[in-house]
């Protein structure tokens, strides 16, 4: 393991692990940000112009840059928290040698550049395992290392498209899940793969190449859907009509306009309990509704009865009643609800963070609690070339040498 460990990582599970990243956008860099949440030291190598995510990013119509900051937007912050960064021209001889010095002391090298681009830059596994035979070389792509799409660029919506995810919304036409859901899933998958490969190296002493893709991550997520499709031999019917769903698995609007969602299986276990909870105990034994098969035939009528009851109380009261009766319901939250949700805050799923130029913000923490370690965001995303001089100094270069490299456009 690397000896270069910044002090803030000391009580984190991946303290001592060094990651070198040559990645852009989110699916790759997001993975090393997760590793850094766990304590790894991440050095991000950017081109002389920087990661394009510094300049381009939006949530639908919402622009995410800041008028008073260059080379930065909110998506870049998400993808590159906790990292140190340098601008390095790895197409030059000296730039490549600096990269090799970093790789020699690294545990993980992570990239999501295209398959054909990596050998040209000398950052493919075959090139870098000569520099460090024990390196764990993690590749993140759109569609995997083989097949007709192997060298195709890919973004989140394209992964959703090819995987079938866009037909799972219940709408008649394909619909994209917003925003960068699959990019984040691929980042999680890649961090999982990197940690697994590191553990394997601890046991057998061997580095290896690892491949992760948007497509593969999406199919992993959709295990149940694809298993059913394979068994049935047809596409799944995932249409969603509230009145067509049983009381045990549908949504209800409460008296204050807020919604709740129930999921109570097996249905027969919860039927009488649910009727009592909503204030209609008598219909539990009503001959029209007393079996699951009968309820299917008159489901719309039944749901209408329950709708009228739910309109009598606000959501908070209904959630309390359901908890008392041990009937499973959860609030249907907006993102604004979630940002202020006590359940998320008390478990550390959201954490308050004093950002140097955003001010006090609330962001996701690390979703796992360790009894002996800390995890989660530590430092903001770096400015363009912010740590170039520091990293070069750690490699033993003098200020004069750094100045010369800058003049030669090897570093920025």
Image (tube, grey):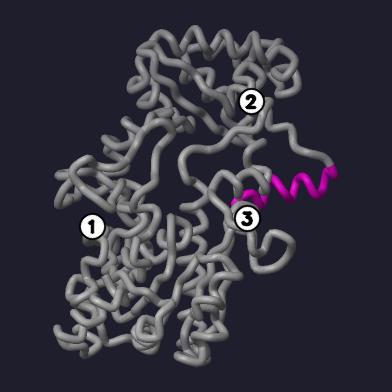
Q: Is residue 14 magenta?
A: no
Q: Nearer the viewer, residue 208 or 85?
A: 85
- 257 to 248, vertically: above or below: above
Q: Is 109 in front, or is 287?
A: 109
Of residue 8 and residue 269, the one placed in the foreground of this image is 8
| Picture quadrant of residue 375 | bottom left
Per the image, the residue denoted by label 3 is 215
Label 2 environment density (alpha carbons within 10 Å; few <14, some 14–19, many ≥20): some
Q: Is residue 200 visible?
A: yes
User: Is residue 372 visible in this depiction of the protein?
Assistant: no
Please, what secondary structure does the residue beneath circle 1 have?
loop
Q: Are marks 2 and 1 in contact (CB under 8 Å)?
A: no
Q: Position of residue 245 (x, y in %)?
A: 64, 23
Answer whether residue 231 is magenta in the image.
Answer: yes
Percent position of residue 64, x then y: 32, 40
Residue that mark 2 sits on: 240
Q: Residue at x 67, y 64 (%)?
A: 150
Q: Report the mark closest to the observer, 2 or 1.
A: 1
Q: Residue at x 34, y 79 (%)?
A: 17
Q: Residue at x 60, y 36 (%)?
A: 265
Up-down relation of residue 43 to residue 168 (above or below): below
Q: Residues within 10 Å of mark 1 (few under 14, many from 20)?
A: some
Earlier residue among tags 3 and 2: 3
Residue 31 image point, x, y percent = 43, 63
Residue 102: x percent and y percent? 35, 84
Q: Which residues are magenta?
A: 220-233
Q: Earlier in the sequence, mark 2 or mark 1?
A: 2
Q: Earlier in the sequence, mark 3 or mark 1?
A: 3
Q: CA distance from mark 3 to mark 2?
A: 25 Å
Residue at which label 1 appears: 380
């Amino acid at each position: 393991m690397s000896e270069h460990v910044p002090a803030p990582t000391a009580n984190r599970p991946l303290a001592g692990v060094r990651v070198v990243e040559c990645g852009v956008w989110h699916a790759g860099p997001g993975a090393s940000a997760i590793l850094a949440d766990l304590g790894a030291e991440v050095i991000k190598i950017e081109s002389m112009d920087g990661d394009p995510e510094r300049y381009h990013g939006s949530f639908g119509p919402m622009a995410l840059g800041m008028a008073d900051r260059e080379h930065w937007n909110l998506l870049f912050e998400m993808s590159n928290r906790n990292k140190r960064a340098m601008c390095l021209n790895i197409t030059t001889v000296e730039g490549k040698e600096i990269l090799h010095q970093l790789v020699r002391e690294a545990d993980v090298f992570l990239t999501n550049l295209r398959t054909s681009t990596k050998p040209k830059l000398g950052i493919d596994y075959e090139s870098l395992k000569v520099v460090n035979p024990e390196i764990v070389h993690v590749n993140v792509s759109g569609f995997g290392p083989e097949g007709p799409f192997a060298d195709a660029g890919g973004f989140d919506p394209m992964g959703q498209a090819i995987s079938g995810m866009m037909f799972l919304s219940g709408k008649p036409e394909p619909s994209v899940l917003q925003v960068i859901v699959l990019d984040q899933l691929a980042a999680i998958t890649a961090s999982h793969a990197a940690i697994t490969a590191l553990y394997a190296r601890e046991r057998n002493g061997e580095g290896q190449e690892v491949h992760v893709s948007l497509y593969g991550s999406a199919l992993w997520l959709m295990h149940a859907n694809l298993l059913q499709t394979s068994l049935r031999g047809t596409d799944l019917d995932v249409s969603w009509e509230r009145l067509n769903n049983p009381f045990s698995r549908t949504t209800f609007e409460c008296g204050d306009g807020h919604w709740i969602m129930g999921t109570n299986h097996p249905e027969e276990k919860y039927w009488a309990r649910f009727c009592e909870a909503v204030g209609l105990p008598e219909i539990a034994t009503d001959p029209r509704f007393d079996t699951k098969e009968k309820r299917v035939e008159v489901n719309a009528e039944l749901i209408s009865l329950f709708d009228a009851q739910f309109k009598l109380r606000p959501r908070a009261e209904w959630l309390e009643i359901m908890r008392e009766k041990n009937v499973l319901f959860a609030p249907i939250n907006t993102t604004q609800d979630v940002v202020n949700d006590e359940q998320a805050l008390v478990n550390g799923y959201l954490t308050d963070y004093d950002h140097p130029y955003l001010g006090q913000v609330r962001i996701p923490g690390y979703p796992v609690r360790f009894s002996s370690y800390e995890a989660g965001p530590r430092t903001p995303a770096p400015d363009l070339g912010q740590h170039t001089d520091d990293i070069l100094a750690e490699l033993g270069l003098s200020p004069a040498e750094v100045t010369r490299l800058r003049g030669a456009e090897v570093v920025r």
